[in-house]
Image: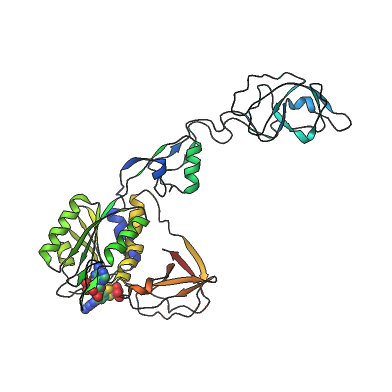
Amino acid sequence: MMLEVKTLAQVNQIISDHFGHLRASGENVPLEAALGRRLYQDLLSKEFVPNFNRSTVDGFALISADAFGSSESIPAILTVVGKSAMGEHSQLTLRRGECASVPTGGELPAGADAMVMLEHAEDYGDGTIGVIKPVAPGANLIFKGDDLKPGQVIYQQGKKIDVADVGTLAALGFTQVTVYRAPVIGLISTGDELVKPGEPISTGQIRDVNEPLLQAALEKCGAGAHAFGICKDDKPVIRERMLTALKTCDGLIVTGGTSVGIQDALPELVSELGTLLVHGVAAKPGKPTLVGAIDEKPVFGLPGNPAAAFFMFQVLVKPLLETMMGGSTGEVRLVLPIARAVPSNHGREDLLPVKIKAGQAHPVIGKSGLITTLANTDGYIRIPRDKEGLQKNEHVEVNLF
Ligand SMILES: Nc1nc2c(c(=O)[nH]1)N[C@H]1C(S)=C(S)[C@@H](COP(=O)(O)OP(=O)(O)OC[C@H]3O[C@@H](n4cnc5c(N)ncnc54)[C@H](O)[C@@H]3O)O[C@H]1N2
Ligand code: MOO
């Protein structure tokens, strides 16, 4: 069987055409568990913020018209009729010629429309003060609802909750929020040579890297992982395991067995159980990757090589998961000069891990089977298939892992 190779852009399009409509359902989570989750719906303010007219300075509340034209030589004399205490609702109502002492954060009494700072008032010690500088209406205060009014959109649907947002939501009285449920992706590692990490290993065997690697990658992008363990290269066994996983999971990633060798049962299995949409991508690493649909759920067959599986996860699986969770790809890109020339002229898009050091992207070149290639890297660059490599100091976009 020959691979019918498609470009990464074509594969992304096929994935989007088939699965782009899938959305996870919503669930309520306590604010403490909301970090990194995406909002299921627009979040609206329930109240006025602030919920009272609040002073931003220590000083006196007054009616600004009373201090019009005041100066050091002709202060405006006002009678102090009371004070506002922090955290208490002011019962005062000012009339012309009156003022009240208000601390920073205290409530402005009714009737007042501005604050004059302590520095611009002289206390005569007889219950009156002299204002030595005029104030504009609204000076030194935040009006009720200046920040937010009830019904106003605070965050839009799909917004990813970051650290500062948790603070904002706490300030607004939210103790729980509705977020997209994390789609759960099943993981199956196939290969007769695989051993669970922690178990004794003989010559010819290798530890299963892909399960923990992809589990971490799924968690990092906010999705859930359900590991179904290692499967021998045995078609009926893999078939059973896939069907079991698809009963409870929203999608499936199977690694290994994607190539065209006698052991590589996955393409046939996907065709039998559903539809094989893609088998072969013009990317290095990642060539034998496959994408299929079983019961309308996305199924990815990623190459056994951990680095290839990881890169294909980044460029194909992650964008779909982001869409399912109501967002767009949150990939953070940095534009940096490349530290040395990189050859690339094999007709496949190159995905190259890089280490960022001293403002430069240092390419880390290794065979796709070597997981240590990825150790200590910060992200990856993409070299288009029609580009003949990169010249030293050429600017590249680094996608952070
Ligand atoms: N005749 C051809 N042979 C190969 C082609 C091809 O186009 N024609 N493509 C090569 C490329 S590129 C890759 S990538 C591999 C992918 O093969 P499979 O997806 O079938 O993967 P395996 O053969 O099962 O494994 C490849 C390699 O990775 C190791 N591996 C597998 N699973 C794991 C795991 N869970 N943890 C750690 N390492 C794993 C496995 O031992 C092999 O060394 O096919 C080429 N061949
Ligand atoms: O493309 Mo394979 O994925 O070279 O390792």
Taking the image as shown, residue 274 lies to the left or right of residue 26, namely left
Nearer to us in this view, 107 or 10: 107
In the image, residue 263 lies at what x, y percent? 15, 73
Kindly give the residue lying farthest to the right in the view shown: 73
Query: What's the residue at 47%, 75% (across, down)?
Result: 362
Q: How many numbered dots are placed on residues in this image?
A: 0
Quarter of the image containing the C terminus? bottom left
Query: What's the residue at 17%, 62% (across, down)?
Result: 270
Q: Quadrant of residue 34?
A: top left
Taking the image as shown, residue 180 lies to the left or right of residue 227, namely right
Nearer to us in this view, 77 or 273: 77
**Any part of residue 118 in sight:** yes
Q: Is residue 295 above or below residue 90?
A: below
**Any part of residue 383 in sight:** no
Q: Quadrant of ligand 1?
A: bottom left
Nearer to us in this view, 118 or 255: 118
In the image, residue 202 lies at what x, y percent? 20, 76
Taking the image as shown, residue 64 lies to the left or right of residue 20, namely right
Q: Is residue 94 above or below residue 271?
A: above
Q: Quadrant of residue 301?
A: bottom left
In the image, residue 287 lies at what x, y percent? 28, 72
Quarter of the image containing the N terminus? bottom left
Query: What's the residue at 70%, 20% (across, down)?
Result: 94
Taking the image as shown, residue 272 lies to the left or right of residue 210, namely left
Q: Quadrant of residue 251?
A: bottom left
**Which color scheme does this rendered protein use?**
rainbow
In the image, residue 231 lies at what x, y percent? 17, 65
